[in-house]
Amino acid sequence: MVAPLPIVELNHAVAIGMAFGPAVGLELLDELRDEPTLKDYHLLPSTRGDLLARLGRDEEARAEFERAAQLTRNERERVPAQPGLRPLSEIRIRRP
């Protein structure tokens, strides 16, 4: 069996987080934090920031969004990371 590529694992963690909740997705993402090929990939901290924000872990989320913005290589990549730098109360998804 061929091991999935790290980016595929990141996408899988996102899908699992959407289906089963941010805590489950975050657990999977945390397993990828030491993956060398994702070390400088801005979407890993950006995704972690989103899941942390959904869990109400605002300070951790903000740090991840800031890291994602630092890792971007150009302005087009930086723009999607910037919403995480707004007040987190504006981006957190509230559940009924």
Image (cartoon, rainbow, N blue to C red):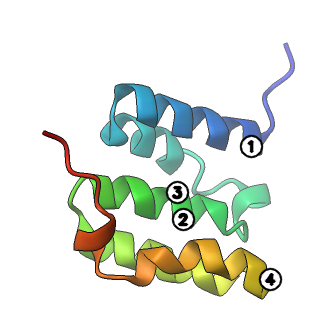
Tell me the CA gap for discs 4 and 1: 20 Å
Ranked by sequence position, the earlier of labels 4 and 2 is 2
* Left or right, 66 with reference to 43: left
Q: Which residue is mark 2?
A: 46
Ranked by sequence position, the earlier of labels 4 and 1 is 1
- Residue type at numbered disc 1: Pro
Q: Position of residue 21 (x, y in %)?
A: 33, 34
The answer to whether marks 3 and 4 mark residues whose Cβ atoms lie closer than 8 Å is no
Q: Which is closer to the viewer, label 4 or label 1?
A: 4
- Residue type at numbered disc 4: Arg
- Residue 54 drawn above or below residue 87: above
The answer to whether marks 3 and 2 mark residues whose Cβ atoms lie closer than 8 Å is yes
Q: Position of residue 72 (x, y in %)?
A: 72, 80
- Where residue 73 is drawn, which disc sits there? 4
Q: Residue at x 37, y 77 (%)?
A: 62
User: Tag 3's secondary structure?
Assistant: helix
Tell me the CA gap for discs 3 and 4: 17 Å
View extreme (top): residue: 1
Q: Which residue is mark 1?
A: 6
View extreme (left): residue: 96
